[in-house]
Image (spheres, helix red, strand yellow):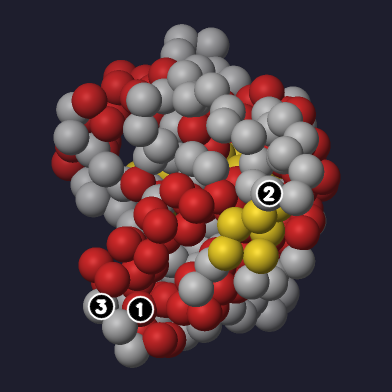
Amino acid sequence: MDEPLTAPAPLDEPLSVVLIDDHGLCRQGLAELLQLRAGMKVLGTAGNPGEALALLHRQTPDLLVMDLRMPAMDGLTLLGRLRSEGVDTPVVILTMSDSPDDLAEALRAGVRGYLLKDMDPEDVIRSIARCGQGELVIAPAMAGKLSGLLRLGQAESPKGKTVKLTEREREILQFLVGGKSNKTIARALNISHDTVKLHVRHILAKLGLSSRVEAAVFAVEHGVAGHYPAPAATPAPATAEPGQPLR
């Protein structure tokens, strides 16, 4: 028998999830994998939007893991419907699509993770566990495409123009590069959650970016230092306000 996988950090309670995928075999296989090998609790599964909506009005999981391409309603449309009905469960996309456009739309919708079905099963489980701890996780194969997307969306900054971050802002930016949540950052720095949110807003405003994902990638590309070339303003994303997991 396979040995149980170890999550990135111990949790007080088993991570609870709901799975949405139009392929029954995929739902069943993932449910067994998460429960038997990772000790997570699968509260239910759904194969279509109607089932998903009904299930999520009865259950309140820690995470919703859903496919992107489904015939009755695609995952992001379903996510928008859930949000409009007051369901704010963090969402992890698990898909076969490695399209940069799909990744961009998912991030704009505020997903907590974007994983690929061809990832190693153990990597999928570990990634879902990290998402459950508040981290933003993107499949390694998509990281380069994310970086490319951000470069395409930004004009070259004016020569010599720089942005200065405070010491605290640089410190918090390092946590953003690691995909850490505001709660995790607040605990690590012994400051309030609201203070972290304020610093993140200041960082995004100074860098001219719209999400913490962009800030993290920008920091990796330019180095986490005190001064950064200021990116030119970019058009607002299709979604008026980025989803909470990305803030």
Identified by mark 3, the residue type is Ser
Label 3 residue SS: loop
- Whether pointer 3 and pointer 1 mark residues with C-beta atoms closer than 8 Å, the reply is yes
Taking the spot 46% from the left edge, 78% from the top edge, the residue there is 168
- The quarter of the picture where the N terminus appears is bottom right
CA–CA distance in space, label 1 to label 2: 31 Å
Q: Nearer the viewer, mark 1 or mark 2?
A: 2
How crowded is the residue under tag 3: few (<14 C-alpha within 10 Å), some, or many (20+)? few
Amino acid at the residue labelled 2? Lys
Q: Position of residue 173 (x, y in %)?
A: 55, 67
Q: Residues within 10 Å of mark 2 (few under 14, many from 20)?
A: few
Left or right for 154, reference 40: right
Residue under label 2, please give it.
161
Q: Nearer the viewer, residue 205 or 93?
A: 205
Give the labeled residue for mark 3.
192
Point out which mark residue 186 bears.
Answer: 1
Q: Secondary structure at mark 1?
A: helix
